[in-house]
Amino acid sequence: MTNSNARNKANKILEEVLELIDEEYMQQTIDEPIEKAVESFEFNDTIPVTHQTFIRIIGDFVRHIYEHGISVRQQLSTSQAHTEMMAVLEEGYQSPSGRGYYTAYLDSKNQKTNGLQFVLAKVAEIITIMTRSRHIKWIFASRIDPSDWSTKCKIAEIFLKHRKSHMSQSLRKCPTDQFADYLPELINVKISIDKTVNKVRYAEIDLDAI
């Protein structure tokens, strides 16, 4: 393969990866469907929150999101939904009270903060984060061949060429092939920067509206 062809191949891969993990793209394909599923979920919010009602409502909520809010639809049985619900809470739930499944249950019983709604919102947020993470890992794994060293080096070279202004002097002096095995980490930094920039832009828009 000529150098020109190799560069075109690397550039095409990088463009596709960046397109599929673009913040706006993920909001449209991941965040918004989950938000719509959350809005369509119905439950009786007048009943007392016991351990059994907590398990049932949160489990039904997780099952509803997996069936209606995720691109790869999953139909969970009741036991599967309860198991997944506990895994989601143990892995990602955190509030001022603590973290994990038991903290979520205690938070749900707090009537002053509309506890059950608070926990449901947190669960939706956790599932969104987990779905984004799986999506990004899949994009990297399916688009970038870990054994194709030369292509990875070209991708690193192209990616870093347009981002040198964000790098320290010491990093600028490093050969680009040293970054070839760290492409996911490099691109994830870009995602974080894009999210921060978007937040600043939205904040500026809100301030201008005041």
Image (cartoon, helix red, strand yellow):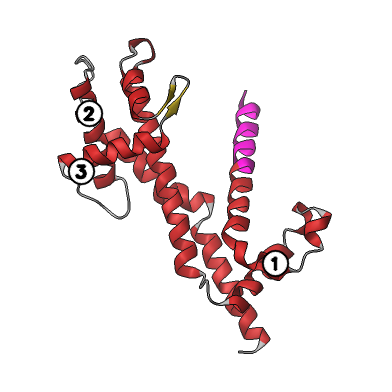
Q: Around disc 3, counting alpha carbons within 10 Å, would you say few (fewer than 14), some (14 to 19), or many (20 or more)?
A: some
Label 3 sits on a secondary structure element that is: helix
Q: CA distance from mark 2 to mark 3?
A: 12 Å
Using the rendered view, name the quadrant where residue 161 is placed: bottom right
Q: Residue at x 34, y 13 (%)?
A: 110
Q: CA distance from mark 2 to mark 1?
A: 49 Å
Q: Which amino acid is tagged 2?
A: Ile
Q: Which residue is mark 3?
A: 80
Label 1 sits on a secondary structure element that is: helix
Residue 98 seen in the figure:
yes
Q: Which residue is mark 1?
A: 178
Of label 2 and label 3, which has the lower sequence position?
A: 2
User: In the image, residue 16 lies at what x, y percent?
Assistant: 52, 67
Q: Which amino acid is tagged 1?
A: Gln
Q: Which residues are magenta?
A: 196-210
Q: Residue at x 39, y 30 (%)?
A: 122
Give the label, 2 or 1, closer to the camera.
Answer: 1
Q: Which residue is mark 2?
A: 55
Label 2 sits on a secondary structure element that is: helix
Vertical side of 160 occupied by 35: above or below: above
